Image (cartoon, grey):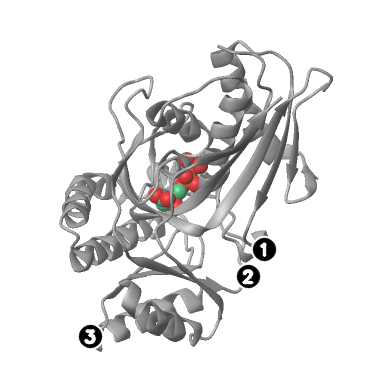
Amino acid sequence: MSLHINRAVAEARTNIALVKYWGKRNEALNLPAVGSISLTLDGLATRTEVRFDPSLAADTLNLNGTPAAGKPLTRVMRLLDLVRAASGRTGHAAVTSSNNFPTAAGLASSASAFAALALAATRAAGLSLDGAALSNLARRGSGSAARSIFGGFVEMKAGTQEDGGDSIAAPLATWDVRMVVGITGEGMKATLSTDGMRHTAETSPYYRAWVESHPADLAAGRAAIVHRDLQALGEVAERSCLSMHGSALAARPGILYWSGATVDAFHMIRALRSDGVGVWFTNDAGPHVKALCAPADAPRVEKALASVHGVVRTICCPPGAGAVVIEEGA
Ligand code: DP6
């Protein structure tokens, strides 16, 4: 352990799951009930500075230029506590974090945020963790963050160990695809993923079927990535998305993340497919739609998605790299 470094800046990109994570096997350690497969995206990133400063009376958090308190600060403090315990460093830290995309768009992702925080905080504390250990730490902040440590296609293992030592992500491969993100208008107060998962597991009669059907989707996703088979990957992505939402929709009361624009975009994507374009949809705990396609088809997909009433903006993302240290020093 070295104590001379007390400041580090790291950047991580968000990721979109193609085979979804939904449900936990241990909430305290944030261990997922199912594995997942994602694509890290270029263009949607969080940059975070962590500065350990003995003169601070408490940890502080500045998010996109505004001091933050409450739940976001508590989640950051919990991760810092883990880093303090692992490094032996005492003292508080000032955390400054910003996204390179508008938070108001509702894409603000805990994935890029906790991956960047895990890397910046460990380096500022003088630790140099490998990818697996960083992924494990990022998972404590948010399950999807474990995947953003790595670039390209990434698989997160549900793991079986009680301490979560094997609940970590690892890179699978990288080949060129596009994820076209369709931002639908605001207006809906979404159920946070953590709450939605808990409610689904506790009340949905379809939750068990979701968990039981999941290993086959993971195997199909993995094989499609290894064989660079976009059609097979797209098909599993659509069915994993619909199965996840099916389990949530059947909760009591049901959780409905889609707006009218979400469903219209799904139909638009399927209509494009009937026209011969290789494009498949996925969607997460909110109304925005993501379309997976080949790079050559991205302009047509983007145009079609932008024409859906209620889609206010599109962003076309190639695969992105894993989390990186931007600066470190005293
Ligand atoms: C629908 O990673 O946000 O995006 O671990 O409780 O922080 P916590 O959940 P989070 O859940 C992501 C859910 C999802 C699917 C996915 O990304 O796999």
Q: Position of residue 311 (x, y in %)?
A: 54, 79
- Which badge, 2 or 1, is on the more N-terminal residue? 1
Mark carried by residue 186: 2
Q: From where the camera sits, is residue 285 visible?
A: no
Label 3 SS: loop
- The answer to which of marks 2 and 3 sits earlier in the sequence is 2
Q: Amino acid at mark 2?
A: Glu
Q: Nearer the viewer, mark 3 or mark 1?
A: 3
Asked if the residue under mark 3 is in contact with the one under mark 2, i.e. CB atoms within 8 Å, the reply is no
In the image, residue 303 sits, relative to residue 180, either above or below, namely below
* Amino acid marked by disc 3: Gly
Instruction: Name which residue lies at 82% across and 23% down.
Output: 56
| Secondary structure category for the residue under label 2 | loop
Q: Are marks 3 and 1 in contact (CB under 8 Å)?
A: no
Residue bearing mark 3: 276
Q: In the figure, residue 131 lies in which quadrant?
A: top left
Label 2 to label 1, Cα distance in Å? 8 Å
**Label 1 CB sits under 8 Å from any ligand 1 atom:** no
Left or right side of 42 for 132? left
